[in-house]
Amino acid sequence: MTEIRYTKLLETLPATVPFVGPETQERARGEIFSARLGANESVFGPSPKAIAAMVQSASDIWKYGDPTSHDLRNALSARLGVCSENIVIGEGIDGLLGYLARMLVEEGDTVVTSDGAYPTFNYHVAGFGGRLIKVPYKQDHEDLDALLQAVKEHDAKLVYLANPDNPMGTYHDATAIEAFIEALPKTCLLAFDEAYVEFAPEEASPKSDKIWPNVVRFRTFSKGYGMAGARVGYAFAPRDIIREFEKIRNHFGMNRAAQAGALAALEDNEWLHAVRKNVSKARDRIGEIARNNGLDVISSATNFVTIDCGREGAFAKAVLDQLISHGIFVRMPFVAPQNRCIRVSVGTEKDLDLFETVLPQALATARSEQG
Amino acid sequence: MTEIRYTKLLETLPATVPFVGPETQERARGEIFSARLGANESVFGPSPKAIAAMVQSASDIWKYGDPTSHDLRNALSARLGVCSENIVIGEGIDGLLGYLARMLVEEGDTVVTSDGAYPTFNYHVAGFGGRLIKVPYKQDHEDLDALLQAVKEHDAKLVYLANPDNPMGTYHDATAIEAFIEALPKTCLLAFDEAYVEFAPEEASPKSDKIWPNVVRFRTFSKGYGMAGARVGYAFAPRDIIREFEKIRNHFGMNRAAQAGALAALEDNEWLHAVRKNVSKARDRIGEIARNNGLDVISSATNFVTIDCGREGAFAKAVLDQLISHGIFVRMPFVAPQNRCIRVSVGTEKDLDLFETVLPQALATARSEQG
């Protein structure tokens, strides 16, 4: 029996993990996945210029990275139209959400999110003792009115909104988002997760130079820029909020090659444009495959397509299990009624050929199992 | 005036940064450093096999890294002689120390360290509201008896010890360390930082398969393995302690290429052996340069040499400033009486040629300035 005196909070935390990685599943299966379509990674990869920058940095990796990520923040500043003092770089949006939770959440504080939205946000909030209020989705969209009402009713310090949303892939347009922000009490900070913004139509996002006193906007190089494994996310917000991140973040947490890669990726607009086109084409194809199997899809503004399997969660889970057992890594929403769906990340043509082959079998088996 | 409701603790934290990076100094100087000898990085770089692994991973960077770092933990398990369940990988020792502070420190809790030891540990402890008790060094060594006494006197939850020490480069032998651990109350956890262990004589370190119920041992790929920019540290400890890390860490925080690089680095013993020899040679040369200038050095078990400038802190600071103004990035201890010294990381022959040329001028100028 240990005599170590952990915090009272830590003792109450479950041994939970937001996501089980595909590698863990592969080891359990004893076989590598044939198609990796479960984590909304970008199969089209990063810009060749980003790869070249990372390759070049490899022999320089004996040096710590610049703890201020000066060059990357400057480039983002020019891109977004905000000052570099409005930007903080972190170990993915995950890392930055962890810092934000730490900045705001004391034990018992109320935090609002949507039921079935990003589990890693919930993990961090719970990890600092926050009390999560979860409001239902409405027609597969995060419900702005309900979020606002919950914030007011529970006097929440912090609210989470992803736009476009994950796991449903839907979005609200900038007008609706801005109205939501304007209506939000100034005592409540919005963690505004725009991880998928590069795939969304322009109307989905407030102008990038828009800074509100109580909004932190999160973006990443993991999705559109194809660098999930590099762990480069960023947040932009008023300077006084960014200064609070500086008080607690792991200043030497950023990989040097990742910083160089992100900088090069940001400069390659042509590549991003091509990725967007590929993603759009692949989304269409996933929709077609689904419809050919009698299934609906949720219209997506992301690099994944959420397929409505048309029945209860157990059925979608059976379909998912079948896909996985045929070597296709996919995931599904955790919460009803969204868990009637499976979520398929955009893949290469070869990935989607396999998906096209396997889906009918998966559905047939699931139907026979589930009656 | 913001209405955002930060934690009470955050409001009390200063806007402090443990270290200013050389890049920030270079931008202020308007000139790149000619020799980078201030951060105890390994100028000899990582194993070519590690570089090759990172280069190969660059095009795979669209995939998230394995959040369990399974392969790297397995390899470390074999190397250390402990189970992989005894190991957690993190974003450098810095990241892991942050997690440990979070696991133990509640506001007002007492934590013991040496006065002038690792500032990033202090940063994390303060960041969770801990009260730091700092005991003086004794003859340029961390003072084991004083640390133990302070732990008992203040009923500390947590104590920090680096062996070999930074910034002095001294060490206690394994017998002394083990006696310290045995005498430590079981209610106090020891954060045992072995960042420099690869450079130390064998007698400096308890056997790597030694696990105590209240000790977390920290090691890194930043120093001996020459991968500071990759951000790969690890901790090993009893399973029940490692499980607590799992409750709070950023599970997807590790860079994929960095994991692959660390794995390859670990397997290249020949390279590590060559680095050790180079470090030993360079240490000798720094000592020789210092003695040729009438200065003493502290005997070092690390990849840096701490040079005693023989006078008060202001003089050492003047020498440091002169070295910096001549393009040599070096650092110095923060706290008296250690701040009579400057700390010079091991460099290439070219780096040390420059140091040899500049040091006499730096000393002369400092002497004329300081009288």
Image (spheres, coloured by chain):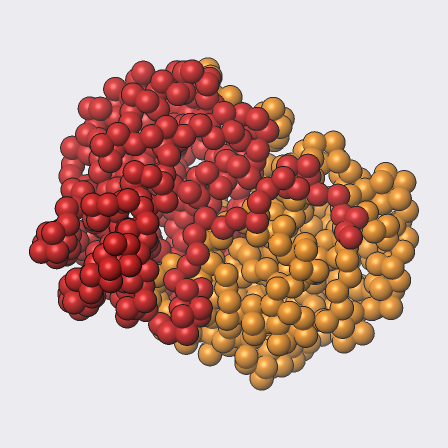
Chain colours: A orange, B red
Residue at point 47%, 23% (across, down):
B157
Residue at point 50%, 71% (across, down):
A71
Task: Point out the image quarter for the C terminus of chain A.
Answer: top right
Residue A121: where, in percent of width, then height? 67, 47
Visible residue check, residue A278: no
Residue A4: where, in percent of width, then height? 47, 21
Residue projecting furthest to the front: B371
Side (left or right) of B318 relative to A6: left
Q: Is residue A368 above or below residue B348?
A: above
Residue at point 64%, 60% (across, down):
A235
Residue projecting furthest to the bottom: A270
Q: Is residue B140 above or below residue B148?
A: below
Residue at point 35%, 20% (across, down):
B148
Q: Quadrant of residue A193?
A: bottom right
Q: Quadrant of residue B55?
A: bottom left
Visible residue check, residue A185: yes
Side (left or right) of B250 relative to A211: left
- Which is nearer the eye, A104 or A164? A104
Q: Is residue B370 above or below residue B334?
A: below
